[in-house]
Image: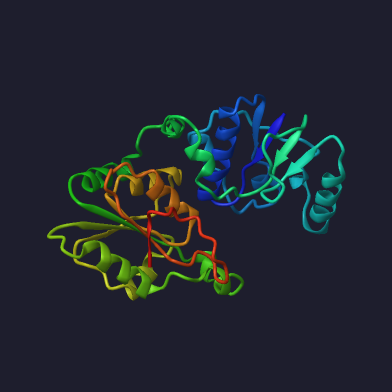
Amino acid sequence: MYIVKISSGFGNQLFQYALALYLKEQGYENIFIDKSAYRYHTPDRSCGIDIISDFPTIEDRRIYYRYKSVFFYISRFLFDLNPFVKRVTESTFTFPIKGRYLFFDGYWQTNFFIQNVKNWESYFHPKEPIPNQIQELAHRINEGYSISMHVRRGDYFSEAYQKQYGICDAEYYEKALDYLTKGLEAYQLFIFSDDPDWVSANIQLPTQHVIVKNEQINPFWYIWLMSQCRDHILSNSSFSWWGAFMGKHPQKRVVTPKVWIKGQKQTIALPEWIKL
């Protein structure tokens, strides 16, 4: 049995989903996804992967997400000692994979898994129609030269995480927009953000812009909207990474911050993307 943990925000959920698809592509059977983290460990977050996933789900008493606080860490330690269940992390992942009961615990932020799945796009078809709230936006995006801009604030600029993730400031977004629009006669900018008020107050925006309203819909649809755009301006976020990666325009241009995490050279931006 192969269990892939689904956790964190929707961008990371897609990377975890990609790992499950890769295991399936490699011929492994009995693949399950475990969503119990949202019930036991991070109840303030939600899982949206069911909109595209057909993998069966499982909650097992041996999976340590049933525990909280200090018991969480104790149970994880005991879980690692369990001779019948092997926890596979990004640092211990090797291929081929051996074991009767494996639990894959990580973010798996790489394009390797998804790009080694044949016809991967077929696994990203939503099981519901386009919500009414975004149908008009989708039409506007596809009727002309469109650019997506993702501005992530939220926890990235909290006291706990700003020194690590607080990279993309107003200067970065303005520089990226200047780069992509130089020489363009007409375009529309579509802005996706968890803090639209900050965007309006701090970034110099062109007249032809739309700040996409945050509706109560599955987050997949915002990534899908981004993917409909011609070009993309990313924050250092897996959410906008997927919006650009899923973009189908053969000549798309993608701008990303040259530093993804402060103090680290590693980036999940693809080699052909433009780093500013």
x 45%, y 33%: residue: 120
Q: Nearer the viewer, residue 140 or 162?
A: 162
x 54%, y 28%: residue: 54
User: Compared with residue 33, is residue 214 higher up or lower down, i.e. above or below?
Assistant: below
Q: At which x and y percent is residue 237?
A: 48, 58
The extreme left residue here reads: 185
User: In the drawing, does residue 164 fall left or right of residue 103?
Assistant: left
User: Compared with residue 156, is residue 187 higher up or lower down, i.e. above or below?
Assistant: above
Q: At which x and y percent is residue 204?
A: 27, 73
x 27%, y 55%: residue: 147
User: In the drawing, does residue 165 fall left or right of residue 90?
Assistant: left
Q: Nearer the viewer, residue 231 or 264?
A: 264
Q: Quadrant of the C terminus?
A: bottom left
The quarter of the picture where residue 217 lies is: top left
Q: Quadrant of the N terminus?
A: top right
Instruction: Identify the coloring.
Output: rainbow
Q: At which x and y percent is residue 229?
A: 29, 49
User: In the drawing, does residue 237 fall left or right of residue 16?
Assistant: left
User: Compared with residue 87, is residue 123 higher up or lower down, i.e. above or below?
Assistant: above
Q: At which x and y percent is residue 119?
A: 43, 30
The quarter of the picture where residue 256 lies is: bottom left
Q: Nearer the viewer, residue 135 or 9?
A: 9
Give the total number of marks visible in the rendering.
Answer: 0
User: In the drawing, does residue 120 fall left or right of residue 136?
Assistant: right
